[in-house]
Image (cartoon, rainbow, N blue to C red):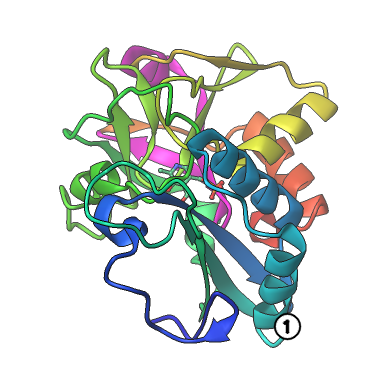
Amino acid sequence: MMGEWLVDGRESRSIGVDDRGLAYGDGLFETIAVRGGRCRFLPEHLQRLMDGCARLRIPPPDQAVLAKEAAGLAADCDHGALKIIVTRGAGPRAYAPPTKPRPLRVLGLEHTAPGRAEYVQLGVRVRYCEVPIGRNPALAGLKTLNRLEQVLARSEWTNSDIQEGLMLDDRRCVTCGTMTNLFMVADNVLQTPVLTEAGVAGIMRGKIIEQARAAGIETRELMISTDDVANASEVFLSNALIGIWPIREIEGRDYARGLVTLKIMRALCAIGVNECDV
Ligand SMILES: Cc1ncc(COP(=O)(O)O)c(C=O)c1O
């Protein structure tokens, strides 16, 4: 349950019923880890939000205002998740965007307990989802408010032994998890699905690629099949809140936590992703 909310800078839990974010998912969001009273990787999250606004032609909110509001909410929170939502704002019925949109910004802070150490230490169990992820270069990479594919995919299982589901596109390319990005290691090369057709370009994904390259680990973005995943020596998941979860099993195929994964976890830990302390 979210604790504190700001709607256009005011304490509130309400938005207008004619908001296009509600009607059409016409907007974007960010989920940011709050640790020790600070928003982790805030500039990167704000940059993705600005890029998303530019691609959707939503007038971007003032970054300084967002940063100030985010910092204010995070200040008294030791461990939490901060959500920033930006919508195109109110509009008359019909899809055509208003010629002069007045975007809405919503920020909310949820205090959370630290994640389960066993997922980091021992890894997680994962399945493949049946709901395909749609390909659309106009939306690929963006964290839009349209998350129905993830909602349907996540409703495919209730078994709490399974922590994540992997999503395939219509070509059966493995694209992402429902709430994570995917990485695998084959021949000592770090590989991750290319996200020009679908998926969210995760902030943690970006950090992992940056840290891997800095550590001299060859890194590639490419199309990945289920066979590629089955033949990989290491597989792991990432997002802004969990850092990295090594995968220990995908539908009966077991994986050991490997040395490349460990090296990247240590590098992330050194830049403030304390969840990766192993
Ligand atoms: C569908 C999807 N892909 C990827 C990610 C990872 O993105 P980030 O690293 O910015 O958390 C998320 C995060 O929630 C997600 O929902």
Image coordinates of residue 228 in percent, x first then y, are 41, 14
Residue beneath the point at 22% across and 44% down:
153
Image coordinates of residue 237 in percent, x first then y, are 49, 41
Query: For residue 131, what is the image quadrant?
Result: top left
The residue segment tinted magenta is 226-251
Q: Does residue 261 show up magenta in the picture? A: no
Q: Which residue is mark 1?
A: 75
Q: Is residue 188 left or right of residue 133?
A: right
Amino acid type of the residue that numbered disc 1 sits on in the rendered structure: Ala
Q: Does residue 244 show up magenta in the picture? A: yes
Above or below for 68 versus 218: below
**Residue closer to the observer: 75 or 153:** 75
Above or below for 115 versus 265: below
**Residue closer to the observer: 49 or 90:** 90
**Residue closer to the observer: 106 or 223:** 106
Image coordinates of residue 212 in percent, x first then y, are 74, 29
Q: Quadrant of the N terminus?
A: bottom left
Residue lying at the far front of the rendered structure:
99
Label 1 packing within 10 angstroms: few (<14), some (14-19), many (20+) = some
Please, what secondary structure does the residue beneath circle 1 have? loop
Q: Is residue 179 left or right of residue 147?
A: right
Query: For residue 258, what is the image quadrant?
Result: top right
Image coordinates of residue 37 in percent, x first then y, are 73, 79
Q: Is residue 1 left or right of residue 67?
A: left
**Residue closer to the observer: 123 or 192:** 192
